[in-house]
Amino acid sequence: MNKRTSLLSIGLAALLAGPAAMAQDTGMSFFMTGSGSGDGANLGGIAGADAHCTALATAAGAGNRTWAAYLSTSGDGGENARDRIGSGPWYNANGVMIASDVDDLHSDNVQTSKENSVSETGAVINGRGDTPNMHDVMTGSMMDGTASSADGDTTCGNWTSNSEDGSALVGHHDRQGGGDNPTSWNSAHPSRGCGQENLQATGGNGYFYCFATD
């Protein structure tokens, strides 16, 4: 192979590999909210939750993306959390990849943990053993990211209730604690109501996860 042919071959290979060879965007595309609504699980519905994600991301310099809350809703027109969040991959504020795609996110390979499920500013949020414990994260979801088909309220009235009645499925961002699935990041147990004090008594503070869909 002569020099000219060799150079042409190298150039063609680079052209064909162009998109794959580009550096992966590791900008923030996942975070756990560093603040909740302050009104328990009343987030203003799913639209209000999405808006809260967007506001926090914008304040942290990531408002150029489309943000969605990782929350399931039930009833007519209900949604699964896993269907709301795009296709991945997702990185936290510190550049750590949480999951490569939706299936990876809901597998044993997911990299959620107290150290990795940080806020939009990269801050580590209190977990089990800290005072106060705030490891409960509202999701309204089963471990596979779908809405629960069980009887009773699992989404605090589709994120409009701050009542002592009702409940929401929560995960543990630190992957430890009690409940049916204590090490699950998205579906550990139900909350003890929907009010701010109810959520705090369970071990949370009305926080939830946000994902960039693009």
Image (cartoon, rainbow, N blue to C red):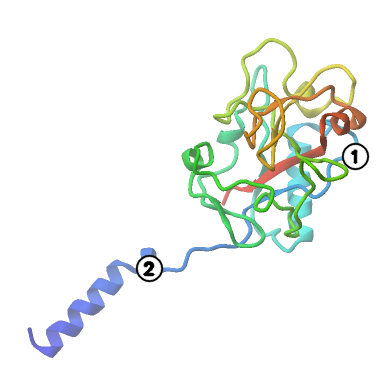
Name the mark on residue 21: 2
Judge by depth and name the residue closer to the eye, 79 or 125. Answer: 125
Q: Label 1 crowding class (10 Å Cα cut-off): few <14, some 14-19, many 20+?
A: some
Circle 1 — which element? loop
- Provide the secondary structure element on which disc 2 rests: helix
Tell me the residue that label 1 is attached to: 38
Q: For the N terminus, which image quadrant? A: bottom left
Closest to the observer: 137 or 49?
137
Q: Spot the residue most to the front.
A: 129
Residue 174 versus residue 96 in the image, above or below: above
Left or right of 123 in this view: 117: left
In the image, residue 91 lies at what x, y percent? 59, 55
On the image, the x and y values in percent for residue 39 come to 90, 35
Crowd tier of the residue under label 2, counting other residues whose Cα lies within 10 Å: few below 14, some 14–19, many 20 or above: few
Which mark is drawn over residue 99?
none
Amino acid at pointer 1: Gly
For image coordinates 77% across by 50% down, the residue present is: 125
Image coordinates for residue 6, horizontal then vertical, percent: 15, 83
Please state if 96 lies on the left or on the right of 189 as rendered.
left
Question: Where is residue 150 drawn, in percent x and y?
Answer: 65, 13
Residue located at (67% from left, 49% from top): 117
Q: Residue at the spot x=86%, y=16% of the render?
A: 165
Q: CA distance from mark 2 to mark 1?
A: 44 Å
